[in-house]
Image (cartoon, rainbow, N blue to C red):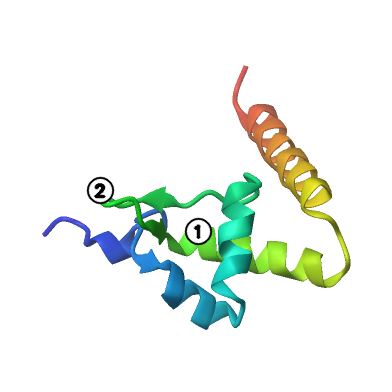
Amino acid sequence: MAGMPFDDEHAPLYSLGQVAEMLQVQQAFLRRLDQHDVVSPHRSPGGQRRYSRHDIGLLQHVTTMTGQGMTLNAIRRILELEQEVRELRAALKRPT
């Protein structure tokens, strides 16, 4: 049997309302993160935001940083730098 969508951490399964409730944040906060390109969820064919488990983990990280007083621009830059570090580490592990 093939893997189920919920087995894929990148499968967009959760609605804006569900994620807001899970993380105990306002829906407007999640919309703002999307508008500022901090966390951009997938969109359903009808245009509704759909979040994956991976997105939710990222949102938890972002929520912690906003709680520490960081701006959305600073958070976006931190996420970019974290991604660069992951890519560089992966490149270093590859055989030459």
Q: Amino acid at mark 2?
A: Pro
Horizontal relation, residue 36 to residue 34: left or right: right
Helix, strand or loop at mark 2: loop
Which residue occupies 54% across, 71% down? 27
The answer to which of 94 and 36 lies nearer the viewer is 36
The answer to which of 61 and 43 lies nearer the viewer is 43
Which residue occupies 65% across, 49% down? 38
Image x and y of residue 88, in percent: 71, 31
Split into 4 quadrants, where in the image is the C terminus?
top right
Kindly identify which residue carries mark 1. 54
Horizontal relation, residue 83 to residue 68: left or right: left
Which residue occupies 70% across, 29% down? 92
Q: Real-space Cα distance between discs 2 and 1?
A: 20 Å
User: Residue 45 bears which disc, if any?
Assistant: 2
Q: Amino acid at mark 1?
A: His
| Label 2, residues with CA under 10 Å away: few <14, some 14-19, many ≥20 | few
